[in-house]
Image (cartoon, rainbow, N blue to C red):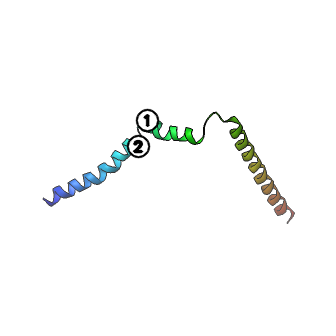
Amino acid sequence: MGVKIEMFRMMLYLSFPVAMFWISNQADYFEEYVVKRKREIFPPGEKMHRKELEDFKERMRDRKEQRLLKQVGMQSEE
């Protein structure tokens, strides 16, 4: 009797994560919940907003590059 209960518990412990993995990786689920939610948050039609984000990213890259160049310049002077 004890072995049957342990087998049942082990089967339950293994089947739950496998079932959740299988359900969450279905293409319909992904399309319905993830892609639609992303499109709500980031609508594809707002080109002005996208341009502002790209400009902001470029400015941040430039600042980081200038900071790194300044650090390298200080280290080479020492």
Instruction: Specify whether 23 is left or right of 70.
Output: left
Q: Which residue is mark 1?
A: 27
Q: Residue at 15% of width from left, 60% of height from top?
A: 2
Q: Gap in Å between the C-alphas at discs 2 and 1?
A: 9 Å
Instruction: Specify whether 8 is left or right of 75.
Output: left
Badge 2 crowding class, 10 Å Cα cut-off, few under 14, some 14 to 19, many 20 or more, is few
In the displayed structure, 6 sits above or below 29; it is: below
Residue 77: x percent and y percent? 87, 63
Instruction: Specify whether 29 is left or right of 12.
Output: right
Determine whether the residue tagged by mark 1 lies in a helix, strand or loop. helix
Q: Which residue is mark 2?
A: 24
Badge 1 crowding class, 10 Å Cα cut-off, few under 14, some 14 to 19, many 20 or more, is few
Amino acid at circle 1: Ala
Q: Residue at 21% of width from left, 53% of height from top?
A: 8
In the displayed structure, 67 sits above or below 33; it is: below
Q: Residue at 42% of width from left, 35% of height from top?
A: 28
- Between 10 and 27, the one nearer to me in the picture: 27
- Between 59 and 39, the one nearer to me in the picture: 39
Can you tell which quarter of the image residue 4 is in?
A: bottom left
Q: Quadrant of the N terminus?
A: bottom left
Q: Residue at 79% of width from left, 57% of height from top?
A: 67
- Between 25 and 71, the one nearer to me in the picture: 25
Residue 18: x percent and y percent? 34, 47
Residue 34: x percent and y percent? 49, 41
Determine whether the residue tagged by mark 2 lies in a helix, strand or loop. helix
Amino acid at circle 2: Ser
Can you tell which quarter of the image residue 6 is in?
A: bottom left
